Image (spheres, rainbow, N blue to C red):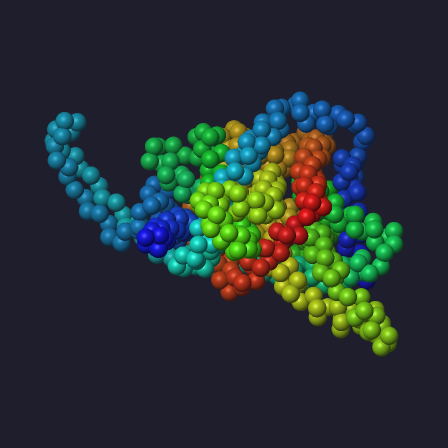
């Protein structure tokens, strides 16, 4: 049972992190939290940017993934090869992905003589495209498994009753894969909120910190500001960030539990 | 009639899928192509194939702006051979980083599997206040984002001298144990207790029971977990960046170092190193595709 040492160690780390500093901690009350929001507006800006990015990317990723899953469950030639290709980008790390897309996007924008850091909107949509490229394949795999689990007699019954394609899709397929949709939604939401590597490699927050997401804002507060108390502010921001992420996770847990009870 | 339209529909679908697949593969191919081009031509003409012959100098026909014609110097051949690769390999010490990445990934994943399988068995079979606390701590550790512990953890690693490629394994085991323990615990709950009791009656101690009865049954869960954890550790950027000294970098950290402090990217070496960084991942994927897809599904259900 040596393995206890390690989780225990983690527990210590975690508990220490509730404090704002580890060796020279001075109690400052809520000052750090106030500073996190008032010293500059970057933290709030990064929150809105993250939120907008998450909403847009969650919708696009899931729609694309679901559409691909529908296409790949029709028994088309080469289904397995397509599945392999669509999934592959998911395994490539965030930093590598960021630079691949920086090249591509700058190449396309170069036609108009601009690049990805010219305008924050370019960075935003660049990130959305990147995340779709990376995550759509992953979610597609989950949707495929769910669609394949729908009993065929249910679909046959629907077609005998004269249900058209769209009717079958909305009345049978989507309700049957609802649990998977919930899972995918939450996975994409948390991924979106926690995004860092891709953000760093693609735009590094440029232009002028306008494409900085929350995780990056926290990192920059910790490690690039020179003020003595910056770490405290960083930790305060991290706590706020944790609360947001935890709220998302707990909502998911609640929904899944409720579903299980209903079943 | 329905048969015909169905078949035509399938061909249209097939064509659409081909286009999507091409779009998915396109970025990778562009990077591959550019890794053989000279530094200047990567950013100025990223979508052109490398050229092997220099374009000749020539005189332009007279125009309104240049009534006497204009001398246009030709361009160099954009093909740079493998110079990007050789320079990049030297500049970021790629093979060294590859070695560290490989070591950290394998050691961490093994560590996680060994520790968490025992831990999961312990907390499912023994119920007291202590295991309840551990269970709770693991749940919390799964939800809390890395940024929350980032700063204190890296300082801690400093104090405890875990800021090297050996110590980081302890950190990875700590971060990875949440999900791994849950997946193992979920499986162990489904194993009938009678099997273990039978082993105990036959005189096997807890250690022997675990290694000879429980562990062999965990094999498929262990493979799934190994895949998921490998994907995570191999691609992780922040933890090695924060804890490892700059002489011992993993691949993501080494690649990020090709961006200078003012954002200038060495694109020649970058393209070549991106290709080298993707290569092992793609090989790994094609080799264990079946397990990876299984792992993704299992992770989604439990996650």
Tell me the quadrant of the picture where the N terminus of chain A can be found: bottom right
Depth order, front residue of A89/B250: A89
| Apparent side of residue B295 relative to residue B115 in the rendered image (left or right) | left
Give the vertical position of B252 relative to B290 (above or below). above
Depth order, front residue of A149/A11: A149
The answer to whether residue B248 is seen in the rendering is: no
Question: In the image, residue B115 lies at what x, y percent?
Answer: 74, 61
Give the vertical position of B292 relative to A100 (above or below). below
The answer to whether residue B58 is seen in the rendering is: yes
Give the vertical position of A193 relative to B2 (above or below). above
Depth order, front residue of A1/B142: B142
Question: In the image, residue B41 lies at what x, y percent?
Answer: 34, 45
Question: In the image, residue B149 lies at what x, y percent?
Answer: 71, 42
Q: Residue at x 31, y 50 (%)?
A: B49
Q: Residue at x 44, y 44 (%)?
A: A164
| Apparent side of residue B38 relative to residue A94 in the rendered image (left or right) | left
Question: In the image, residue A174 lies at what x, y percent?
Answer: 54, 44
Q: Residue at x 55, y 55 (%)?
A: A151
């Amino acid at each position: 049972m040596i393995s206890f040492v390690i989780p225990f160690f983690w527990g210590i780390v975690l508990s220490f992190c509730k404090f704002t500093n580890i060796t020279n901690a001075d109690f400052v009350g809520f000052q750090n939290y106030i500073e996190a929001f008032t010293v500059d507006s970057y933290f709030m800006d990064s929150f809105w940017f993250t939120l907008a990015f998450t909403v847009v990317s969650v919708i696009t990723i899931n729609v694309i993934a679901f559409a691909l899953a529908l296409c790949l469950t029709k028994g088309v030639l080469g289904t397995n090869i397509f599945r392999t290709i669509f999934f592959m980008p998911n395994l490539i790390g965030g930093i590598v992905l960021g630079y691949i897309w920086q090249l591509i996007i700058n190449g396309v924008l170069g036609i108009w003589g601009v690049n990805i850091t010219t305008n924050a909107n370019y960075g935003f949509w660049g990130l959305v495209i990147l995340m779709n490229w990376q995550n759509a394949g992953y979610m597609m795999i989950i949707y495929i498994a769910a669609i394949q689990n729908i009993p065929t007699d249910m679909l046959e019954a629907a077609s005998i009753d004269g249900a058209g394609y769209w009717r079958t899709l909305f009345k049978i397929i989507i309700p049957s894969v609802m649990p998977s949709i919930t899972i995918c939604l939450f996975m994409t939401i948390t991924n979106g909120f926690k995004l860092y590597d891709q953000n760093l490699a693609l735009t590094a927050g440029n232009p002028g910190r306008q494409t900085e997401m929350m995780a990056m804002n926290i990192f920059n507060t910790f490690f690039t500001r020179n003020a003595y108390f910056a770490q405290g502010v960083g930790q305060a921001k991290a706590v706020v960030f944790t609360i947001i992420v935890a709220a998302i996770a707990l909502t998911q847990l609640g929904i899944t539990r409720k579903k299980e009870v209903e079943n | 009639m329905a048969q015909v339209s169905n078949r035509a529909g399938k061909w249209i679908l097939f064509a659409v899928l081909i286009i999507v697949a091409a779009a998915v593969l396109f970025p990778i191919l562009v990077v591959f192509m550019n890794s053989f081009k000279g530094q200047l031509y990567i950013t100025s003409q990223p979508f052109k194939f490398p050229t092997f012959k220099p374009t000749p100098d020539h005189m332009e026909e007279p125009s309104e702006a240049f009534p006497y014609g204009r001398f246009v110097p030709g361009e160099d051949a954009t093909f740079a051979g493998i110079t990007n690769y050789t320079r990049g390999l030297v500049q970021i010490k790629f093979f060294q980083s590859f070695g560290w990445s490989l070591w950290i990934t394998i050691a961490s994943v093994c560590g996680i599997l060994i520790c968490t399988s025992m831990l999961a068995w312990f907390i499912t079979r023994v119920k007291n206040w202590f295991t309840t606390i551990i269970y709770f701590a693991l749940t919390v550790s799964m939800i809390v984002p890395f940024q929350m512990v980032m700063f204190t953890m890296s300082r801690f690693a400093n104090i405890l001298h875990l800021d090297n490629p050996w110590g980081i394994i302890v950190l990875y085991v700590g971060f990875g144990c949440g999900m791994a323990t849950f997946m193992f615990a979920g499986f162990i709950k489904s194993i009938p207790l009678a099997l273990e009791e039978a082993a105990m009656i036959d005189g096997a101690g807890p250690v022997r029971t675990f290694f000879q009865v429980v562990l062999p049954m965990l094999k498929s869960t262990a493979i799934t977990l190994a895949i998921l954890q490998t994907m995570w550790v191999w691609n992780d950027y922040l933890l090695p960046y924060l804890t490892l000294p700059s002489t011992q970098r993993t691949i993501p950290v080494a690649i990020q170092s090709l961006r200078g402090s003012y954002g200038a990217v060495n694109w020649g070496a970058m393209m070549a190193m991106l290709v080298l960084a993707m290569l092992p991942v793609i090989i790994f994927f094609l080799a264990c595709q079946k397990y990876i897809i299984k792992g993704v599904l299992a992770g989604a259900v439990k996650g």
